[in-house]
């Protein structure tokens, strides 16, 4: 994620690749999994591997730039647990959206289930065809008792996006 050829990737997302078998975590590194600007330089990022989902994660240190084409590359240095390398480098490219996402004010935790506005900032709205996600940025005094939304809110969890509530 994003997929090869995507034209509306969000600038503050991790780049991921899911495998159908476990990899040797020692072979997944910043040298074997890279992100770069097409025709430009490398993007500083932390590279990791989630063993539970067999997912390589490239997490850029800063948000990506808007309206820029990026290339992700996984090299043949990555092997499965038996030591078999990728048959060839896996390379895909995507472009970030041409403009920043919308910021809007939605609701406080008190009024969250009612969907009324009182100050909770929606810092990101993904209105792309595959989107429909909101990133809610709570105020310091807002509290949430559970990582769920009232049935009034239509919430989905597309592949690659996991709801996270932090304090």
Image: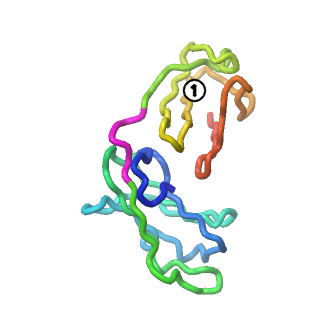
Q: Position of residue 160 (x, y in %)?
A: 59, 52
- Residue at image position (48%, 30%) is 123
Is 100 contained in the magenta span? yes
* Secondary element type, mark 1: loop
Q: What residue range appears in magenta?
A: 95-101
Residue 145 placement: quadrant: top right
* Residue 25 as seen in the image, left or right of residue 149: left
Return the residue nearer the eye: 28 or 72. 72
* Residue farthest to the front, as pictured: 129
Q: Nearer the viewer, residue 57 or 158?
A: 158
Q: For the C terminus, which image quadrant?
A: top right
Establish if 132 lies above or below 162: above
Q: Position of residue 68 (x, y in %)?
A: 31, 50
User: Which residue is located at x 72 percent, y 33 percent?
Assistant: 148
Q: Position of residue 42 (x, y in %)?
A: 32, 62
- The residue lying at 44 percent from left, 27 percent from top is 103
Does 148 sit left or right of 45 as displayed? right
Residue of label 1 = 138
Q: Position of residue 131 (x, y in %)?
A: 53, 41
Please check the rendered image and state whether residue 29 is part of the magenta-colored stretch, yes or no: no
């Amino acid at each position: 994620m994003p997929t090869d050829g995507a034209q509306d990737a969000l600038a503050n997302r991790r780049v991921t690749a899911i495998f159908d078998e476990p990899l040797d975590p020692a072979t997944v590194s910043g040298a074997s999994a890279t992100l770069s600007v097409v025709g430009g330089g490398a993007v500083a990022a932390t590279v990791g591997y989630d063993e539970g989902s067999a997912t390589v994660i490239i997490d850029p240190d800063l948000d990506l730039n808007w309206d820029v084409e990026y290339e992700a590359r996984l090299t043949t240095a990555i092997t499965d647990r038996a030591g078999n390398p990728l048959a060839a480098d896996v390379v895909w490219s995507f472009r970030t959206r041409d403009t920043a996402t919308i910021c809007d004010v939605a609701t406080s935790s008190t009024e969250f289930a009612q969907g009324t506005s009182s100050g909770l900032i929606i810092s990101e709205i993904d209105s792309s065809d595959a989107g429909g996600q909101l990133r809610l940025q709570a105020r310091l005094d807002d509290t949430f008792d559970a990582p769920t939304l009232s049935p009034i809110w239509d919430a989905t969890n597309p592949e690659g996006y996991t709801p996270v509530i932090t304090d």
